[in-house]
Amino acid sequence: MITTEPPLVLTKPDKLIVDFITNQTVVTIATSIDDDPYCATCFFAYNEEHTTLIFKSSEDTEHIKQGLINSRVAGSVLPDKLHTGKVKGLQFKGVLGSASALSDLKKTYYKKYPFALAMGGEVWSIDLTWIKYTDNTLGFGKKIEWKKA
């Protein structure tokens, strides 16, 4: 029988989480209303100061339509380059909102993706409330958990 240690709960995201999420580019966002779940993938940037994911999308997309009705979202981030046998990634929960209120969130996004300035859509944010990071390169089943205070 394989046993794993329980997830470690931290008061702020661990450096391993921040390093991982900062260096990735694509997030899967899950939304749901009226028993109708939906997933979307988007380019994203991470703002460490606000513990927030930032992405660009249009209000007429299904994930934004659903997120405006039910702002509680979940999702995952996998490495941009997958390595078989070296499971690494994170799951999260958060609250969807517009990034227009915080100009530094938009700056974070456009610094990572300057070409997006020429594209349509709005910049959105996910205020992260929970993260579970898995990294089997640190030992089988190694998980680090973070919850917003």
Image (cartoon, rainbow, N blue to C red):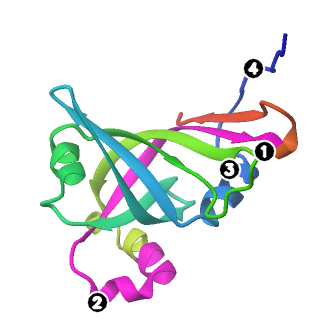
- Please report whichever mark, 4 or 3, sits nearer to the chain's N-terminal start: 4
Q: Closer to the N terminus: mark 1 or mark 4?
A: 4
Label number found at residue 17:
3
Instruction: Say which label, 1 or 2, has the lower sequence index.
Output: 1
Type of residue at label 1? Gly
How far apart are labels 3 and 2 at the CA level? 31 Å
Where does residue 3 sit, x and y in percent of width and height?
82, 15
| Disc 1 from disc 2: Cα separation | 39 Å
Cα–Cα gap, marks 3 and 1:
19 Å
Q: Residue under circle 4? A: 6
Between label 3 and label 1, give the one nearer the viewer. Answer: 1
Q: Quadrant of the N terminus?
A: top right
How crowded pointer 1 is (Cα within 10 Å; few <14, some 14-19, many 20+) is rated as few
Residue 2: x %, y % from top left: 84, 16
Whether the residues at callouts 1 and 4 have beta carbons within 8 Å, the answer is no
Residue under label 1: 85
Alpha carbons under labels 4 and 2: distance apart: 45 Å
Three-letter code for the amino acid on which mark 3 is drawn: Ile
Q: Does the magenta stretch include residue 113?
A: yes
Secondary element at image label 1: loop
Task: Establish if 42 lies above or below 114.
Answer: above
Q: What stretch is highlighted in magenta?
A: 107-136
